[in-house]
């Protein structure tokens, strides 16, 4: 009897132990599968957002390069002198650049590379300062091409980017350089807010393997250092896979993702090259701690661990039965998480793909259209200045050319305004000044009458961005009205909002289109981009306001909060 009891006990123990290990293996496998699902989802989300971020950076950098190129075109067709006309041209271009990114300074030098003109009032950039020993000046002297100097220490002692262009006369002699400087962290980091993804790090590396932007940590500050520096490699644990992947990326063979182990733990990295004028200047990377990816499922995993411990003391039958049911529940939970993540992926991927596509279009437009368009514009202005006795027909031809250039430039700006991720910098601004600025830069035909409001409002907003909105609405209204058309701008307010309304006597918006006009890429115009009103909506919503449209009469109404 005792012997039979001992055998039974042993059998029970064996069954318990075997069952425990079966369940443990099942649990570990299920946990592994769940983590693989979460990692796969994060890769798709992160890579899609990374593409969109890189395209936005590309668009902004190409726009800055375009504005500098226009100044070069002006100086190559005029004497390289700092006269009033030159000051007006450079001041306008500087303001355009400053809308893209906050600029530290704009400078021009003479043949000896001493500053002869400076904008932005930077007291550390005095007239006469010698820049001849700066690396970007040496590069321009050797190549006679623009220079992107990422690792320069500015005149104020800060780490900055300098973009400099050579001024070359008709004899191919270098007459000097023009350039701008800006804060790389401020410029690049703003693009990291395009998507709200679970990502701790945005890293930017230049084509010389130097870190331009990187998060601060308690171990090492890599900004200004190069990838192959000894302390950087020590931080990366001299991992050969990381080195190989980095070299592939620098050679234009970037992998979709990389798992890296650093002194701060394991990270998931994605990287996309950023091109300016078809040349790779930077690499934008997103780095995420893998441990943070599993936070959504951690509580469920912890509960399952406690259940697993309690199973060891349960009866064999209960263990086996619960094991099967638990495994099914675990799989069902994984399926639910998979469905949820798939929906998130579909939503983010749709957004990132659209934004990346538009960003790529913007980068191509900036390069392929804006440069030759600026040449046409500058040449036209020079021809008019050189020929004072133009006939009426010739004047009419130049006016048509001016209008065509303005329309093309506006369509290009619509695309660029849509993809730029500009922070809202609110300040007190008078509506009368903003609408005056808009109308001064707007071509209003004689057939259209614009009636401004008698009253004025003091708004709390970003004036430059609200001027973009007003300009888009007024251009649309001008296109909509016919001969003797009237556009009425009205101001009002209630307890919480300042209200701006733009009405016109045009033919109205088809009722079936009213709900679609603010969607990106939707347009009823043959020559429209479908991005103007989408940009307006984005800007107004970033201000915490709303924009709506209605018919009878056709009116767009903007509400901006008074206290926000």
Image: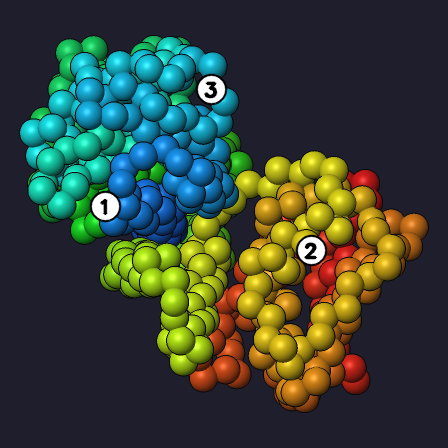
What residue do we see at 23% from left, 45% from top?
76
What residue do we see at 42% from left, 47% from top?
323
Q: Are marks 1 and 2 in contact (CB under 8 Å)?
A: no
Whether residue 425 is visible, yes or no, is yes
SS assignment at label 2: helix
Gap between marks 2 and 3 measured at Cα: 30 Å
Above-or-below relation of 114 to 363:
above
Label 1: few (<14), some or many (≥20) within 10 Å?
some
Q: Which mark is residue 122?
A: 3
User: What residue is disc 2 on?
Assistant: 435
Quarter where residue 143 is shown: top left
Label 2: few (<14), some or many (≥20) within 10 Å?
some
**First of labels 1, 2 by sequence position:** 1
- Give coordinates of residue 129: x percent, y percent: 32, 14
Task: Check the picture and name the quadrant holding the C terminus.
Answer: top right
User: What residue is disc 1 on?
Assistant: 76
């Amino acid at each position: 009897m005792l012997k039979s009891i001992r055998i039974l006990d042993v059998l029970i123990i064996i069954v318990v132990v075997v069952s425990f290990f079966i369940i443990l293996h099942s649990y570990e496998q299920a946990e592994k599968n769940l983590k693989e699902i979460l990692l796969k989802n994060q890769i798709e989300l992160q890579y899609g957002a990374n593409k969109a971020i890189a395209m936005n950076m590309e668009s902004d950098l190409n726009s800055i390069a375009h504005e500098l190129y226009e100044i070069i075109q002006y100086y190559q067709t005029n004497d390289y002198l700092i006269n009033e006309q030159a000051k007006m041209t450079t001041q306008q271009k500087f303001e355009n650049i400053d809308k893209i990114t906050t600029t530290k300074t704009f400078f021009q030098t003479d043949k000896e590379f001493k500053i002869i003109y400076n904008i932005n009032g930077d007291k550390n950039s005095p007239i006469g300062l010698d820049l001849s020993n700066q690396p970007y000046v040496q590069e321009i002297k050797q190549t006679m091409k623009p220079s992107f100097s990422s690792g320069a220490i500015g005149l104020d002692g800060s780490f900055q980017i300098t973009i400099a262009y050579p001024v070359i006369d008709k004899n191919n002699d270098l007459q000097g350089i023009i350039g701008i400087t800006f804060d790389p962290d401020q410029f690049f980091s703003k693009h990291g807010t395009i998507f709200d993804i679970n990502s701790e790090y945005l890293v930017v590396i230049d084509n010389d393997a130097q870190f331009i932007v990187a998060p601060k940590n308690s171990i090492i500050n890599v900004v200004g250092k190069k990838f192959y520096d000894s302390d950087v490699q020590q931080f990366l644990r001299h991992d050969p896979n990381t080195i190989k992947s980095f070299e592939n990326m620098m050679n234009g063979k970037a992998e979709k993702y990389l798992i890296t182990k650093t002194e701060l733990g394991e990270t998931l990295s994605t990287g996309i090259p950023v091109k300016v004028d078809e040349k790779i200047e930077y690499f934008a990377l997103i780095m995420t701690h893998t441990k943070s990816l599993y936070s959504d499922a951690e509580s469920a995993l912890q509960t399952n661990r406690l259940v697993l411990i309690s199973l060891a003391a349960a009866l064999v039958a209960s263990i086996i039965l619960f094991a099967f049911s638990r495994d099914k529940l675990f799989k069902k939970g994984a399926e639910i998480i998979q469905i949820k993540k798939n929906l998130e992926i579909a939503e983010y991927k749709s957004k990132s793909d659209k934004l990346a596509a538009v960003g790529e279009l913007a980068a191509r437009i900036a390069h392929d259209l804006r440069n030759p368009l600026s040449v046409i514009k500058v040449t036209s202005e020079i021809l008019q200045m050189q020929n004072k006795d133009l006939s009426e027909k010739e004047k009419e031809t130049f006016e048509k050319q001016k209008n065509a250039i303005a329309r093309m430039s506006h369509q290009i700006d619509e695309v660029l305004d849509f993809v730029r991720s500009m922070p809202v910098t609110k300040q007190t601004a008078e509506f009368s000044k903003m609408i005056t600025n808009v109308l001064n830069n707007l071509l209003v035909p004689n057939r259209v009458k614009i009636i401004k409001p008698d009253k004025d409002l003091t708004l709390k907003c970003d004036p430059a961005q609200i001027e973009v909105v007003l300009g888009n609405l007024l251009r649309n209204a001008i296109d909509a009205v016919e001969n003797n058309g009237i556009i009425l701008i009205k101001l009002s307010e209630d307890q919480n909002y300042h209200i701006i309304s733009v009405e016109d006597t045009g033919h109205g918006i088809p009722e079936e289109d009213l709900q679609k006009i603010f969607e990106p890429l939707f347009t009823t115009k043959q020559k429209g981009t479908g991005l103007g009103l989408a940009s307006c909506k984005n800007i107004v919503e970033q201000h915490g306001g709303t924009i709506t449209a209605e018919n009878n009469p056709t009116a767009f109404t903007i509400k901006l909060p008074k206290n926000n």
